[in-house]
Amino acid sequence: MAYLILVRHGKSEWNKLGKWTGWTDIGLVEEGLEEAKRAGEAIKDFRIDIVHVSDLKRTHETWREIQNVIGRSDLKAKAHPALKERSYGIHTGKNKWDVKKEVGEEEFQKIRRGWHYPIPEGETMKDVHDRAVPYYEKHILPELKAGKNVLIVGHGNTLRAMVKYFEGLSEEGVSDLEFGLGEVYVYDVDEKGKIVGKEIRAANPEKGKV
């Protein structure tokens, strides 16, 4: 038995401002650092063997706070662009709530969470799935099968896409999924790599509001 632990990064400067961040490399605010620390406290009872992060600094900063809390200065995270956030293309840097007022609820939800919905110069949720899941299957799944406990510090859409894969969610189901900033999902994984249990820790009461 091994554990797969998913943590969404803490609140960034643009999260706080309600902006779509995507691939923009924005750091955490103080509240985000505290969320990262809470995530660390929530997983102190696990032995972490391997860590994967995206190539964006908000995941690195989140991992550093977790690392300090769990006392694992020896662990070096593996960074890869396959785990980065969805590109919001022409909407990057826009205030999402202003966009909602402009386009209406239905169009806003398509832009924000639509599985196949294209954003000019950006990605669909399916695009994110199609880069994140192969990375998981090639690099992370073998580690879990070998009995290693793996931590992934990622982004909202990347983690949603992976949860869809793990839990067999429908396109509508993953669109409705809220994975809050600093939240922790812990999956039990058997020796064949099958998910056999799940627990949510450090739940964020603000999820879906930023």
Image (cartoon, rainbow, N blue to C red):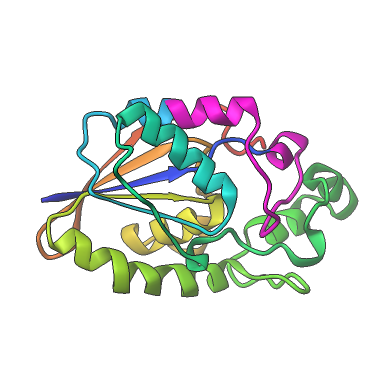
Using the rendered image of the protein, determine whether residue 78 is visible from the camera's viewpoint. Answer: yes
Residue depicted at 36% across the width and 27% down the height = 69
Residue 164, compared with residue 120, is above or below; it is: above
Residue 35: percent from the left, percent from the top? 51, 28
The quadrant holding residue 11 is: top right
125 in magenta:
no
Quick one: 190 or 71, which is closer to the camera? 71
Residue 10, compared with residue 5, is above or below; it is: above
Residue depicted at 23% across the width and 48% down the height = 49
Residue 67, compared with residue 19, is above or below; it is: above
30 in magenta:
yes
Q: How many marks?
A: 0
The stretch in magenta equals: 13-37
Residue 36: percent from the left, percent from the top? 48, 32
Residue depicted at 76% across the width and 45% down the height = 19
The quadrant holding residue 114 is: bottom right
29 displayed left or right of 77: right
Residue 2: percent from the left, percent from the top? 16, 50
108 displayed left or right of 72: right
Quick one: 88 or 26, which is closer to the camera? 26
171 displayed left or right of 169: right
